[in-house]
């Protein structure tokens, strides 16, 4: 447990969102300064936030099936979702025929 650190961190407002500050030493040790994306899990009931280096963790072992689906869905762009929605409407008749084969 020598590598576990506990400390109060600030929550800051950034535009319409909020961010949590991290120690610069920790950011460098984890390589977040080179690849700033991290995996974050929120537990609403307990108010717990868990974060990890997305390159060092396996989403299959770290996340539940629902969380994996949410993570994958979050990587889909709004433009792609709009295209899929439009395609489903425009080609509704063909989709219905395919579904009933």
Image: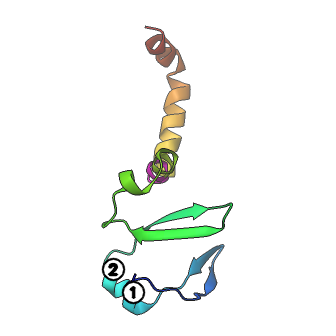
Near-viewer residue (67 or 81): 67
Instruction: Return the mark for residue 30.
Output: 2
Q: Position of residue 53 (x, y in %)?
A: 37, 70
Residue named by callout 1:
26
Disc 1 packing (10 Å; few <14; some 14–19; many ≥20): few
Image quadrant occupied by the N terminus: bottom left
* Residue at 46% over, 86% down: 5
* Residue at 66% over, 65% down: 46
Image quadrant occupied by the C terminus: top left
Near-viewer residue (52 or 35): 52
Instruction: Say if mark 2 contacts mark 1, CB within 8 Å.
Output: yes
> Vertically, is 67 above or below 34?
above
In the rendered image, the residue lying farthest to the front is: 1
Left/right of residue 92 with respect to residue 44 in the rendered view: left
* Residue at 38% over, 86% down: 2
Q: Decide whether residue 6 is among the magenta residues.
A: no
- Where disc 1 sits, the SS reads helix
In the rendered image, the residue lying farthest to the top is: 101
Label 2, label 1: how far apart the Cα atoms are:
6 Å
Residues shaded magenta: 71-76
Name the main secondary structure of what is drawn in magenta. helix
């Amino acid at each position: 447990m020598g590598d576990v650190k506990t400390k109060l961190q600030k929550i800051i407002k950034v535009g319409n969102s909020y961010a949590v500050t991290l120690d610069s030493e920790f950011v460098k040790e984890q390589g977040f300064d080179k690849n700033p994306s991290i995996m974050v899990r929120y537990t609403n009931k307990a108010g717990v936030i868990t974060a990890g280096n997305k390159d060092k963790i396996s989403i299959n072992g770290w996340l539940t099936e629902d969380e994996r689906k949410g993570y994958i869905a979050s990587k889909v762009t709004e433009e792609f979702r709009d295209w899929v929605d439009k395609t489903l409407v425009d080609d509704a008749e063909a989709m219905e025929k395919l579904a009933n084969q």
